[in-house]
Each structure stands twice: as structure tokens, then as C-alpha cells.
Amino acid sequence: MSPTTLDFSLIDTAVGPLSLLAGADGGVRAAGFTTDPAELLPLIHPELRGPVRQRADLGVLTAAVRSYLAGELTAIDDLPVDQRGGAFVSTAWSVLRDVKPGDPVTYTGFAALAGRPRAVRAAAGACASNAVALIVPCHRVLRSDGTLGGYRWGLPVKKWLLQHERQVTDRGR
């Protein structure tokens, strides 16, 4: 069986371009703040990789991300995601999607939400191995002292995303 072609598109953001890679079924397989899809391919499970073709727009995916950037923070919540990991990592990724914008959690709190309160390092590892930045919002996890910690796409991007979400949620209160 030949690999599925992945559709690739760039979306301009205030902190640089966001790349999306999606399968034929529309599930996002990778997303990151880079212009180079080759930088995203190694993040995708080997069984989900394939040749890449560029598209100007990915329809519903592009529209949802643009809505998020315009202040509709829940627009990305139901986007389909296709990434694979072990049992804990998959659970952790699912839990990340429930962390609300403007209400980040600590790695300790994230580990507890994922069902393993003592597995703080494993929770951090789930964030580090997340291929679908923004849509699986690992940027919403902070160190226990409230500092940013790490982020594959750089701390300025993480800081901007958190500020964007905080500003939008503060306006809505």
C-alpha cells in the first residue's frame, strides 16, 4: 500500500507562519511554526507519513485556525487530529485538548489530569512529542512556578499564544 499524500499549507500569524500537514481524511498530522514541511515530517508517526503537496488552503482546517487567531479560541477544539503514541501519551494528548484557553496548567497538574499525578516527566514528554502544536495545545502547560518552560517552536511563540488567549478570555469576562 502506498503512503497517503499529505496536504501542506501555511497560515500567517503574528509570530510567523504556522504550517499544517493533513491527511486525505482531513485529520491534522502535524502543525508547527515553521515554513518547512520537512521539519514537521519527522514528528509524525512513520505509518502516517507520506509525500507532501502544497495547497493554498486546507478548507475547514485553515478557517478554524484563522478564527482562533481572530479571537474565537474554541474554533480549533473539534478539529480532527491524527497522531499516534503509547497509551499514556495518547491519553495526555487528549487531555491537553481539554485545557481551556486562558487557563494554563502546570506540568504537575497536567500529569494529574492525565491520570498519573506522579508522572510529571512523562507528562512533559507528551508535550515534547506532540506533533500537532496549537491544536493539541501543549503551550498551555507551564512549570510549577508559573514560568514558560520549553516549547519546540520557541518561547516567544509560546508567550504570544498564552497572551493572545489571556487577552481574549479577559475581554469576554
Image: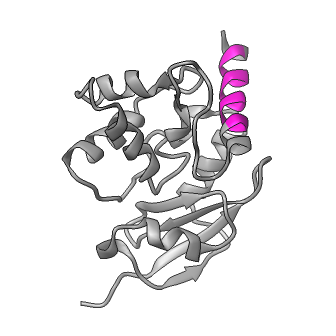
The extreme right residue here reads 14
For the C terminus, the image quarter is: top right
Residue 122 lies, in percent from the top left, at 32, 40
Q: In which quarter of the image is residue 111?
A: top left
Q: Is residue 45 left or right of residue 36?
A: left
Q: In this view, does 66 lie to the left or right of 104?
A: right
For the N terminus, the image quarter is: bottom left
Q: Is residue 90 above or below residue 159?
A: below
| Main SS class of the magenta portion in the image | helix
Question: At 54% from the left edge and 56% from the top edge, which residue is drawn?
Answer: 61
Q: In which quarter of the image is residue 97?
A: top left
Q: In this view, does 160 lie to the left or right of 126?
A: right
Q: In this view, does 160 lie above or below 39?
A: above
Q: In this view, does 25 lie above or below 125?
A: below
Residue 17 lies, in percent from the top left, at 73, 59
Name the one closer to the observer, 49 or 72: 49
Q: Residue 110: say if magenta.
A: no
The extreme left residue here reads 87
Magenta residues (range): 159-170
Name the one closer to the observer, 115 or 13: 115
| Colouring style | one colour
Question: At 47% from the left edge and 23% from the top edge, which residue is drawn?
Answer: 106
The extreme top residue here reads 173
The extreme bottom residue here reads 2
Residue 139 lies, in percent from the top left, at 56, 38
Q: How many marks?
A: 0
Question: At 49% from the left edge and 40% from the top edge, which residue is drawn?
Answer: 138
Q: In which quarter of the image is residue 88?
A: top left
Residue 20 lies, in percent from the top left, at 57, 63
Question: At 29% from the left edge and 59% from the top edge, which residue is drawn?
Answer: 84
Q: Is residue 20 above or below residue 99?
A: below
